[in-house]
Image: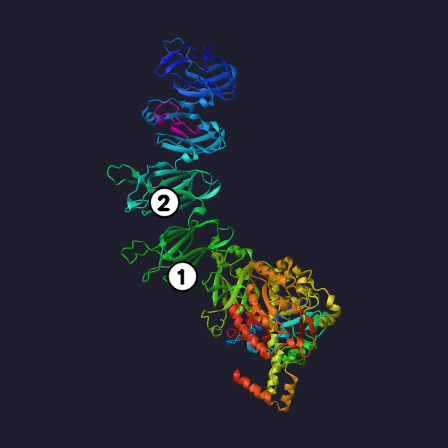
Amino acid sequence: MSDQRKKIRSEADERLNDMDNKNDNTDLGYSKFPLCREPWESYYILRRGILPCCYGNPIVAPMKDWKEAWNSPEIQEIRRYLSQGKLSPYCRESLGCPIVQRVLAEERKKQGQSGFINPRRPFFLRVINRIFWHLPARIYNFLKKKDNP
Amino acid sequence: MPKLKDFEIEYLNGWFGEESDDSGPFRWMGQTAFCKIKKLEPSGKKYLCFQAGHSFSDKEVPDLKILINGKRAGTRKITSAFSVYSIPFEESGELVIEFMLDRVFKIPGDGRDLGIMIRDLFVLLPEEMNFYADGWYLPARSDLEEKGQARWMKQKALCIIGPVPSDVTSFFVLTCGHPFAAAENPQLEIMISGERKETYAILPGQNRLLIPLKNVSGMVEAELSLDRVFHESETHETRELGMFVTKWELLDGDSVDTYFEGWYPPEKVDQDSVQGSCRWMRQKAVLVFTGLEDQSFHFLVIKAGHPFRNEADPELRIQVSGEEKAVFKISPDEKKYLIPLGITQEHIRIDLTLDKTFPAVVPGDKRNLGILVKKVEVKLPSEIEMLFEGWHDPERSDPGSSGKEPRWMKKEAVCFFSGIEPGLRRYLLIRGGNPFLHEEDPILKVWANQELIVETKIHNENNTYIFPLGYTEEHIQIDMKLNKIFKPHDREDKRELGMLVHKIELLSNKDNEILIAENYNGWHEWEQDNFYEFVWISECAKSGISPRQVDAYKYISFYAFSEFLDFSQKLRLKLNEAEIEEIPLMHKWNFYSVRIKPGLTQNENIIRTNRTVDGIEFEVEFSVNKLFPAKFHLDDTRKLGVRIAEVRLHNDDEAHANFLYFHRNAIVNYHEMVEGKTDLESYPLNLGIDLYGKCNIKPPCVYCLWDNMKKLEGEYSDVNVDENTLAGYGPFFRSARTLVNCSFGEPLLHPRFKEILELCAKHHKYLELSTNGQAFTKKTIQALVGKPIFLYVSLDAATKETYAKIRNDKWDSIIPNLELLNRERKEHNNFPKINMVFMPMKVNREDLEAYFQLCQKIEADALILRPLLFLLDPKIEKDRGGYHFNYKEELLPRKELEAIFKQCELYSERYGVPVANQFEFGTIKEPGKKTGTDFYFEFQRS
């Protein structure tokens, strides 16, 4: 324990010295952040299991494995994707997360689909969309953009 | 009771025949003589009184021994000059009194053995006694004695005073003295009823002594005894002379003159057409005050002046019981002076002495005048006004204004503060400026309770000056003096103007606090955000701590809020210009602790030289390496560095060690995150916990995934999580800034709720708790208040009907409990924070505005707009409160949600309720570019 603490300390000191020469710009530091900070900054030790974020689904480990799960391959994979600016397969399954919803919406937009997942979009509209090569959705999106530039 | 004066005394053998002279009949006695009283009725104390004298030399004074019924009653030296003698005795019934002399004389031509002459022999009860009972010469006919009808006492004398009333304190006032200016002054000791009182020096001329008669009543014996009698060479006569008494009085408290001695009679004053009486003081004078509050601190207020403007001002010395209380010059202009007398009895005698007097200017007035005293009072501290003296009337800009207008200070001024809680460190705050535009700035000297505390230049502009006073008593007298004054341009205005003071007040600090004065030394105003009452500092802010605090405390702690996310803003702490720490600051509010002692040892020399009185302080400096860039706060033109709150001194080693561990982890965590590390050495800052697995809402709320979750929890569903579990998370617990409870269960029902909250508060952890609002009790409310907790109260409804559709019929008890919690937290730093959660759904769509009104009513800190958890194909349908709840139908489409956000902005402004929109979770916005609904980003987690 104390060894680990020492290690953390010395590394922290090193980094503090580094920081003196950087960050002279007036950016408050936002630009350096990954897509989502949760898997670094947060950790959930819950009865239902260990989660990397509060929208996470499914659990990555049972409750008793809280010590090990912090650096488990599952969570490390999530971190790896996020640090590269991408959503991991795990995140893509966590549809309750507003970040995931936003990213997916953007992807769908890029693919010419309508933005946010809309649970109430009636089935027949989707059929019509497909039949007409997504033209109604494109017209709709175009008009919407015009309304709210 | 019979008067004894008329008792016949039978002269038996040993007496010569009755003779007579100018003063009446007398008898000579031989060596031994007898008298007899047949039957003396009253028992108790009586006196055998007589006058005696002889015509022989005072060098061979005979001793007279008196025996009553064979028992020795007393012995007296009989001087040649006729004197009064009284022998106290108790016997009654038949008395035989024997007078025995140790010697006899013979006069040539007279064959008799002559002893002494005795006249006026009586037995008297105390009530019948003359004041001059024993040891007094008869009034003789010398000039001096005639004038004052004075009577000389011998070395020892007895006086009988009375009757003294039993219920009030009376005063025995004795006017006495001696005429021998060249001789050594005798000391008089007075015993009242056998109890020793004070000793008084008897000065040449007249002295007026004040002797309180406490706990005595009826006829009281006062025994006077002098330490010396005047020598024949001093008096030029053969009698043994002690002092003379010209007058004695027995007065009740109200009748004792305030102007006791040394004052000319009152006179009407014509100068300045001031009404009322004034008195001239002689060189020496005495003031007496009675009826004061016993054992209380008192002040003498004396309003005086003198008309001798061309002469040097006289100096007045004030003494109480020989102890000097003050020495100061009396200036010509009439002015009030304040003199602390200390803790006094219910009466006080104050001696005033001037170093000079002036001969009266009016022809024919032969008096020597001291100072002209208009008023004297003894006051309790609470009776003294704050702006005591030396202040002009407020500068009223318009009539009827508040009285908080600035005031001109004269050249000298006095302020007085009373009723101060003792044991706190004080500062004097003066806000003002000087009117000397083109001259050198005047210098202000300030004394606190007679001790000089500062000497400083007063600048033109209106500035704030703060002077540390140290640990003060319950009252403080502030004397202020300027070195120059200013004459107003307006010729009509005859005032002398010193400085214009807008504000003068005392600031105080507990021993573990440091002074943060608004808009002073780099601190901006006090403000309040959704966490703390805080102050922005500019690049650098200074305060002070006392040597006592440096000795008593190891660490300084505070909360700081940095706008920078990358630890690039650093806070530097200095003590007396020596750097003690430089801390990279975390984004948002966080607890910090810094050891102050290392700086002290390194720079001991600097500190020791500054170490004088306790009031002199060490300078503590907070500075930042860079400011919060102005582009982020365009509306606020101040220089903003960092927000600081709750600066305290402490000795909690554990808290300090915890902070160091926490802070280093946070730095490592940040770097691991921005560098994209996946295998972390650091631990998370937000720790999700699961406090309790049971809920009081049964069946569960309509949208709750209760059954699924409990299936998922399985065997862990009943596992115990309490304060020991949390502490057992080790580095995960120590590294966490915020603990977030995410239980499927109501945390307020936890049997160890209080202990869990206490653990978190002790370790400076913020705790986020979601509650359904149905578990508030007196106990849970008591556990919550004052702790750094963020409550998320999930109601999702503003009416009983809607609530019944989502949960149950227990709506009525919730709002009164929230109101109670709100009242209680106001007395505890406004913690916990109350956030009201609203998940927009089809069922509560119409409740939105009413929910804002509800938040306003209970003074919630924020309304939390939280998304109903998105489920792709929920298949959850329930019937409750007459409503069919279909989860899929309740999830609103984005377009409708956007409309709700817009409405929220509108309502937020209308009802003054901040909105935190959790739909925008994960988006990072720069400060200053906030929309109406991103209050959430002020929160700790983002």
The answer to whether B449 appears left or right of B870 in the picture is: left
The kind of residue tagged 2 is Lys
Q: How many marks?
A: 2
Give x and y (percent) for residue B182: 35, 32
Does residue B140 show up? yes
Point out the tag, 2 or 1, that comes first from the N-terminus.
2
Residue A78 vs residue B702, the one in the foreground = B702
Q: Secondary structure at mark 1?
A: strand
Q: Which mark is residue B303?
A: 2
Number of residues whose C-alpha sits closer than 10 Å to that of mark 1, classed few (under 14), some (14–19) or many (20 or more): some
Q: Is residue B234 magenta?
A: yes
The kind of residue tagged 1 is Asn
CA separation, marks 2 and 1? 32 Å
Q: Residue furthest front?
A: B882
Q: Is residue A67 magenta?
A: no
State which region is magenta: B225-249
Q: Secondary structure at mark 2?
A: strand
Which chain contains the residue that carries disc 1? B
